[in-house]
Image (cartoon, rainbow, N blue to C red):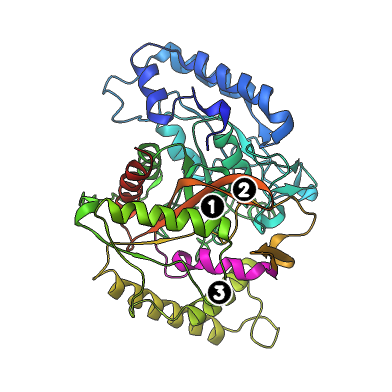
């Protein structure tokens, strides 16, 4: 399934190459993106905060200076128009996390990632929509309204980076950067039929991605890098994901460049108390079968998989403590230092178990979520139920599929694998490719190889 507006829109690297080779100016490229947004976004509402005037001024200045003379090595994103999740600070624009109370709070500085993207030549043309507090697989709030899925306007684009995925999937921009602690990059990519990458925790700085009440308390201050939560790109192909990951990374990444046919994969399609709907399971099983026919070695079970009941319990507790800044402990009070160190011990043990698994397997395949794009609702997905194979299941249990990679701090790339029919609608379906820590570029390369086998 491909959203119609995407068919003739170049990606990140293709756009940068066209500008570098003189086939398009930066101003023309940025203006074309603005025109697309003005044409499409009235029905989708992906863009929360436009910054068109400054972006066009930046574009004209870049044209006057001319493209880099090094063939793009130093500025691989030169002239590429892009958006970024509303929760990242962009100097001169508000950062609200979806709260009306912070509508007038203007960021005095760019987030570290924004600085990196600009230094690489990207032109930030606006910020994309989020749910309140970044805590839903939908993206609506009282400040900027509700974002819809470009494939079906009655469905969610996912969250919390739902505006990011919708902007990319609709063809407004070739890329965006979101964040992910509970699938917030991977689920929107899956719901919207685009590529997304959850980076290894700690790879990309989130300095300047702070709740507004914190970052405005005493002027601009840098908060700690929240455990579990990562920054990751969304784009339309693997090569674009790779360059965006490298641009954002705080350390150099190495590629192992091992062909997929020489790899051993493990597919996980069942988790305790987290059933997968047929609309996801059927295209997933079809993709696994296609890979197997192409000679890819895929195991379906392994005693090396960490206890997923235990992992999910610890993941959910750590995520809740992180997002609530200290709550809840087992008795409902604020978590103590002992509670937190117990969780760190559990995480370290889980990370060691996954490291042992990756001594045998190169990558793990799994659904990013147990359902396709959910219908719009005024209730957060995790506070209610989701329909899975005709039955109502607790929405919170769906997080187990995000926690597979999040709790042990692993990288995971989501690629589109096809489509399924969920609650009467034909919708995109993705798959996540999980790898060892710091194997981000290898995950993306494996996902690309898988996509080539599945789609030609």
**Which sits in the foreground, 352 or 293?**
293
Q: Is residue 357 above or below residue 120?
A: below
**Which of the image's four quarters has the C terminus?**
top left
Disc 3 designates what residue?
Answer: 318
Q: In this view, does 451 lie above or below 351?
A: above
On the image, the x and y values in percent for residue 363 come to: 32, 61
Query: Which of the 4 quarters of the picture holds residue 274?
Result: bottom right
Counting residues from the start of the chain, the first of labels 2 and 1 encountered is 2
Image point (45%, 82%), residue name: 346
Residue 97, x across and y down, in percent: 68, 50
Q: How far apart are marks 2 and 1 (CA)?
A: 9 Å
Toward the viewer: 389 or 33?
389
Q: Name the residue under label 2.
A: 87
Please give left or right for residue 236 compared with residue 132 in the image. Answer: left
What residue appears at the point 48 percent right and 59 percent down from the top-left corner?
367
Viewer-closest of 357 and 280: 280
- Near mark 2 (Cα within 10 A), the count class, few <14, some 14-19 or many ≥20, is many
Discs 3, 2 touching: Cβ within 8 Å: no
Question: Label 3 crowding class (10 Å Cα cut-off): few <14, some 14-19, many 20+?
Answer: many
Q: Is residue 68 above or below residue 188?
A: above
Earlier-in-chain disc, 3 versus 2: 2
* Image x and y of residue 396, in percent: 65, 69
Residue 181 seen in the current view: yes
Q: What stretch is highlighted in magenta?
A: 392-410
Label annotation for residue 179:
1
- In the displayed structure, 27 sits above or below 114; it is above
Tag 2 near tag 1, CB within 8 Å: yes
């Amino acid at each position: 399934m491909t959203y119609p507006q995407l068919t003739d829109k170049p990606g990140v690297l293709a756009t940068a190459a066209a500008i570098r080779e003189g086939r398009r100016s930066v101003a023309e490229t940025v203006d074309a993106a603005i025109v697309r947004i003005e044409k499409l976004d009235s029905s989708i509402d992906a863009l929360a905060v436009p910054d068109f005037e400054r972006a066009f001024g930046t574009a004209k200045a870049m044209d006057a200076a001319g493209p880099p003379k090094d063939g793009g090595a130093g500025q691989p994103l030169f002239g590429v128009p892009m958006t970024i999740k509303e929760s990242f600070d962009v100097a001169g624009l508000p950062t609200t996390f979806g709260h009306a109370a912070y509508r007038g709070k203007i960021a005095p500085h760019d987030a570290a990632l924004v600085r990196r993207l600009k230094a690489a030549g990207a032109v930030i043309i606006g910020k994309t929509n989020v749910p309140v507090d970044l805590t839903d697989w939908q993206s609506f709030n009282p400040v900027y309204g509700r974002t819809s899925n470009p494939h079906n306007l009655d469905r969610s684009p996912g969250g919390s980076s739902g505006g990011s995925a919708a902007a990319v999937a609709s063809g407004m921009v070739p890329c965006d950067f979101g964040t992910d602690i509970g699938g917030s990059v991977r689920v929107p990519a899956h719901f919207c039929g685009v590529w997304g990458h959850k980076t290894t925790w700690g790879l990309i700085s989130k300095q300047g991605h702070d709740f507004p009440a914190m970052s405005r308390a005493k002027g601009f201050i840098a908060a700690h890098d929240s455990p579990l939560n990562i920054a990751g790109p969304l784009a339309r192909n693997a090569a674009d994901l790779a360059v965006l990951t490298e641009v954002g990374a705080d350390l150099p990444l190495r590629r192992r460049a091992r062909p997929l046919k020489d790899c051993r994969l493990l597919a996980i399609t069942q988790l305790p108390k987290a059933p997968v709907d047929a609309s996801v399971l059927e295209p997933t099983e079809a993709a696994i079968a296609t890979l197997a026919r192409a000679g890819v070695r895929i195991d379906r079970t392994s005693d090396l998989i960490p206890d997923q009941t235990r992992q999910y319990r610890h993941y959910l507790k750590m995520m809740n403590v992180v997002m609530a800044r200290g709550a809840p402990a087992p008795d409902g009070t604020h978590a103590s230092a002992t509670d937190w160190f117990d969780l760190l011990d559990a995480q370290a043990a889980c990370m060691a178990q996954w490291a042992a698994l990756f001594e045998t397997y190169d990558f793990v395949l799994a659904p990013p979520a147990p359902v396709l794009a959910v219908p719009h609702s005024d209730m957060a997905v995790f506070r209610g139920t989701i329909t899975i194979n005709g039955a109502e299941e607790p929405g919170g249990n769906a997080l187990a599929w995000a926690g597979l990679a999040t709790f042990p701090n692993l990288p995971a790339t989501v690629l589109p694998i096809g489509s399924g029919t969920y609650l009467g609608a034909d919708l995109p379906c993705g798959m996540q490719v999980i790898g060892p820590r710091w194997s981000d570029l290898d995950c993306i390369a494996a996902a690309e190889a898988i996509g080539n086998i599945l789609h030609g």
